[in-house]
Image (spheres, rainbow, N blue to C red):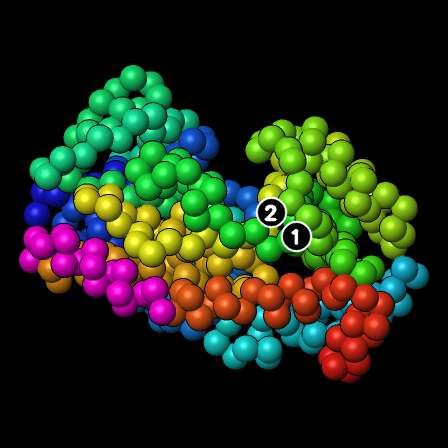
Amino acid sequence: MNKTVLISGAGIAGLTLAYWLNRYGYKVTVIETAAGPRKGGAAIDVRGEAVGIADRMGILDKIKVKKITTSVEFVDADNKCLATLKNFGEDNLKQDIELNRDDLVAIIYEAANTDIEYLFNNRIKTIHQDNDKVLVTFENGEKLNFDFVFGADGVHSSVRKLVFGDETLYNHFFGAYFAILKVEETLGKLNRGKLFNLPNKLAATSDNGNSFVLFRSPKLNYAYRDDAAYKNILMENFAGCGWKTADILKAMTNSENLYFDEVCQIKMSSWTKGRIALIGDAAHCSGFPTGMGTSLAMQGATILANELMTANGDYNSAFSKYNSAFHPFVEAIQGTIINGLDFLVPKTEEAIKVRNAMLN
């Protein structure tokens, strides 16, 4: 085929697309701002169609080996269990596989690695396309032509900004913020995730070393990637909340690897423009309370690759079918975010009690 593609982002969406396009005969280059495949984040779920995709990729058994089976406990300030989700990720949904995000990234990267060129510690600066090619300028000054460019670079996608316009055109804020920290020494207990609620707030620890906080808030004014601002916001919202929040705040405010962001969704009428397409969170971030971000990333990347393979060179047809085939499912998943937020961060003490009673 000898078609050349550039994929921006070496996370789950980008690596899945790289895997398939490499096997379909494309010459694949992946560019990533980090020093290696994009790591970090909490435990994730491979669900629904994504399980079958993992099987077709030949990685399902490796994913199952890394499976986490965790009991999730909602606790009070004295660490007393109030309600439990037993065997979360196994009995809750039989086809789900919960595992650490880093493990899934490593598994897909290993599977996709053959004949793929990786440009780590680099980024796209400009993109210009015509009917025949896409000219990309990199941060290091290099310029290369590609047949196609795919943005798999997350909710704050630079490809989307360069090609489709500013993020404010597509970002829908859902009145909450969250922070995740992976620590060497877990604040939790083996095979236990513990979640503590106050109205509009959640703090959590887990056996895989993740600490997590989530809180409702009006839109805040802070600079993206300003760690000092993130830490001040967390202190303002969780200082004196009790339970293990003091320990969590100490770990987060002393860390250089804190992830902080708003709960939002990306909604676009089209994920393609000319020879450029978006996948994963760059195209359709569903928001983590839906529990489907990883599965949507794998599914969307696979659909796009399959449409390109069967289009006999007609990429306009392939892109059109990618949009029309996947949009309804994405929109249905995005529609579940409010229920997810209400479950995780009830707004009142009474709502917390009702949620806990429903689980018991």
Residue 9 image-quadrant placement: top left
Circle on res. 262: 2
Say whether marks 1 and 2 touch (CB < 8 Å): yes
Q: Is residue 357 left or right of residue 112?
A: right
Q: Is residue 30 left or right of residue 107?
A: left
Task: State the extent of the magenta-drawn residues as a range.
Answer: 312-328
Residue 251 image-quadrant placement: top right
Residue at image coords 28%, 44% = 150
Residue at image coords 59%, 79% = 91
Question: Can see residue 11?
Answer: no
What amino acid does circle 2 point to? Answer: Glu
| Residue that numbered label 1 is attached to | 176
Q: Is residue 62 left or right of residue 3?
A: right
Circle 1 SS class: strand
Is 72 drawn above or below residue 124 in the view shown? below
Residue 23 percent location from the top left of the image: 20, 53
Q: Could you tell me how far apart the alpha carbons at marks 1 and 2 are, in whole angstroms? A: 6 Å
Residue 62 percent location from the top left of the image: 43, 61
Q: Tell which of 27 and 138 is nearer to you.
A: 138
Is 324 drawn above or below residue 24 in the view shown? below
Prevailing SS of the magenta stretch: helix
Q: Tell which of 138 and 57 is nearer to you.
A: 138
Residue at image coords 61%, 41% = 259
Is 330 drawn above or below residue 242 in the view shown? below
What amino acid does circle 1 point to? Answer: Ala
Of callouts 1 and 2, the N-terminal one = 1
